[in-house]
Amino acid sequence: MIEESSSPGSASSGAFPFSSTMASVECKRGLDLLAQLEQILEEDDLIDELGFVHPTQLAELNANSGFGLLDLSNEAQSADRAMREGTDGRSILYDETVFWNRDHKLAISTTELPLLVVAAKKLFFDSYKKYKFSKNPEHDLQDDVLRHSKSFLLICSDNGTAWNSRKLVISRNLCLSLVMDELRLSALILSYSPKSENSWSHRRWTIKQFHRACGDFSDVVAKESELVKRIEERTKMNYRAWNHHSWFVSYMTWRQMFNEFNISRKWAELNVADNSCFQLRRKLLLSIFYYESKDQCRDDGPVAESDDYTMWQNEFDWNHRLIQCYIGREALWVHRRFLSQFWLNHLSSDPHSIPDVADFLQKELELIISFLSSPEDEFDANRTQGQLAASYFFWVLKVLKYSFPNGPLVKPWRNLSGLGLFMELLESSSPRRILLWRSFLGRQSWDELFNSLD
């Protein structure tokens, strides 16, 4: 029995070379598939869409393309490969059970992704180490890093080291062709991974390099706007895309800002719960207001008639209509806060003009009382609307407190009518929130407002 127990050990030691052989075969296949992928990317450098699909979907793509999968019963095709014509007329040799490439579109089978990841990671890090520690890197080393990092990022888009390696190469050899390649690569990755933070970050870095190299790139800004809009339409609540959209507003001309401001309005009306679009409109409104050369851009036409106050008034009225149509949407009330502060800081005739501020505050109070007076509904939406409205009102009071540092808080709205009704509605609808609002506004300010009502 003791002698027999040692036999499994010898058997396992005999099985180890078999496992090593299997790993070697898989490694060789992974490298072979990676070489095919890199060849496809090199031959068709205008690929603008990438997808990872199930093998059955890949078979359908090949069937619809008129090729179909290989007949494995045919000994001439037993290698599971076929010659496919590239988009530029050149032949590309690749495994059609793993890849599909046509009309600048690329599909990769999900079953082979593990092998591709291992192979791409190995070749990338090997080439990057040689390039990074070389005192005078040759052109071939640079090409190896760019080629292997590209294939690696297509599979693992959030690998920061691969993105940084491309930044290093481009920084040492800044030229327009490399910058355009980076824009195409990030756009390709965003086609299947629209929320990849590293891809968006790298794209912003690339745009800055383009600006350094070329200076004027209004056409690039227009194309960038089209790309971001497509992604925003395809993926809802994509904060990264909207953040990128807001970022490159600073590179727009005044007319581009104005057009973007008008175009985004329709999208915001259809997606009132998405605060990101309203954030973009806030950035555009501020950028238009602060644009240094805007007076030179206001030639004859519709733009010439749109002064800052008119734009603000239209936006303020539009926000009012949306609030009445869509009950309980916090994004609309956040946008109204910005519009109110924008008026107080930039558009009021005199920041210390109490009649103007009091008139504005009286209208806002009447609006809020109308929402607090709405009857309760089945989904409790009117109550939510009332709480958002009250929070907005107290926020305005807080802003006014810092707008009048030299006078008592009660001074701007001493003659306001409706404060008593406002307090009664708060006590009946949201009694538990009164302490919160009182703490937010400050005890002294609260007493100055409401103690006179007793």
Image: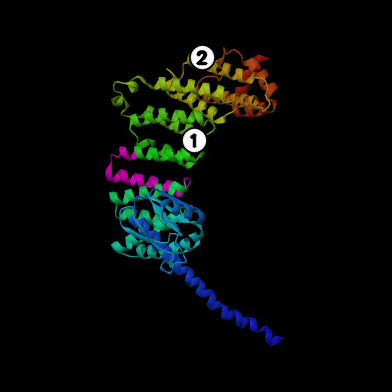
Residue 98, image quadrant: bottom left
127 drawn magenta: no
Q: Is residue 282 above or below residue 240?
A: above
Q: Using the image as rendered, state which of residue 70 and residue 248 is in the foreground.
A: 70
| Disc ID at residue 70 | none
Q: Which percent across, then down, holds residue 389?
A: 59, 24
Q: Is residue 294 above or below residue 356?
A: below
| Residues rendered magenta in the picture | 194-221
Q: Amino acid at mark 1?
A: Ser
Q: Is residue 370 above or below residue 60?
A: above
Q: Using the image as rendered, state which of residue 297 and residue 3 is in the foreground.
A: 3
Q: Quarter of the image for the N terminus: give it.
A: bottom right
**Which residue is located at x 57 percent, y 23 percent?**
393
Q: Which percent across, then down, holds residue 152?
A: 43, 58
Give the residue at mark 2. Answer: 359
Q: Please, what is the dominant secondary structure of the magenta stretch?
A: helix
Give the residue at mark 1. Answer: 276
Q: Is residue 354 visible?
A: yes
